[in-house]
């Protein structure tokens, strides 16, 4: 299967094909999101629903430095500002 037959010719095509599907989004500040993609724009602003946010919190000083706590929360709907987006991963396709 070549790229042209899948309809993917630019990076935004991959995001367009992920509309209404669950995507993984990595953000600045050690934050990660998993949610259903409803809309996006050229600035990479996103609207997601059924979102689970994971925040990695590095704690400690001295010998305890580097201990990582993980905080999670769920949200029904979320607007993500594009300047914080590092990576968007579409769902696995077989």
Image (cartoon, rainbow, N blue to C red):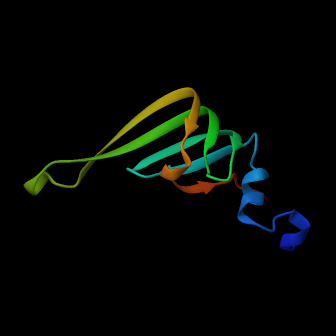
Q: Is residue 63 left or right of residue 19?
A: left
Quarter containing the C terminus: bottom right
Residue at the (88%, 71%) spot, across then down: 4
Front in this rendered view, residue 73 or 15: 15
Residue furthest to the bottom in view is 2
Front in this rendered view, residue 12 or 49: 12
Up the image or down, 41 lies above or below 20; here it is below
Spot occupied by residue 17 in the image (x, y as percentages of width and height): 79, 52
Residue 10 position by quadrant:
bottom right
Residue at the (45%, 30%) spot, across then down: 73
Spot occupied by residue 31 in the image (x, y as percentages of width and height): 43, 46
Q: Is residue 83 left or right of residue 7?
A: left
Q: Is residue 50 left or right of residue 20?
A: left
Spot occupied by residue 72 in the image (x, y as percentages of width and height): 42, 35
Label tally: 0
Up the image or down, 9 lies above or below 66; here it is below
Residue furthest to the left in view is 62
Quarter containing the N terminus: bottom right
Spot occupied by residue 84 in the image (x, y as percentages of width and height): 48, 50
Residue furthest to the right in view is 5
Residue furthest to the front in view is 43
Residue at the (22%, 55%) spot, across then down: 66
């Amino acid at each position: 299967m070549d790229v042209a037959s899948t309809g993917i010719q630019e990076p935004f095509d991959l995001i367009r094909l992920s509309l209404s599907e669950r995507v993984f989004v990595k953000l600045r500040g050690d934050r990660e999101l998993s949610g259903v993609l409803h809309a996006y724009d050229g600035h990479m602003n996103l609207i997601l629903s059924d979102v689970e946010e994971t925040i990695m919190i590095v704690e400690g000083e001295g010998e305890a430095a580097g201990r990582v706590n993980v905080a999670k929360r769920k949200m029904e709907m979320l607007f993500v500002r594009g300047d914080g987006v590092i990576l968007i991963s579409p769902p696995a396709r077989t």
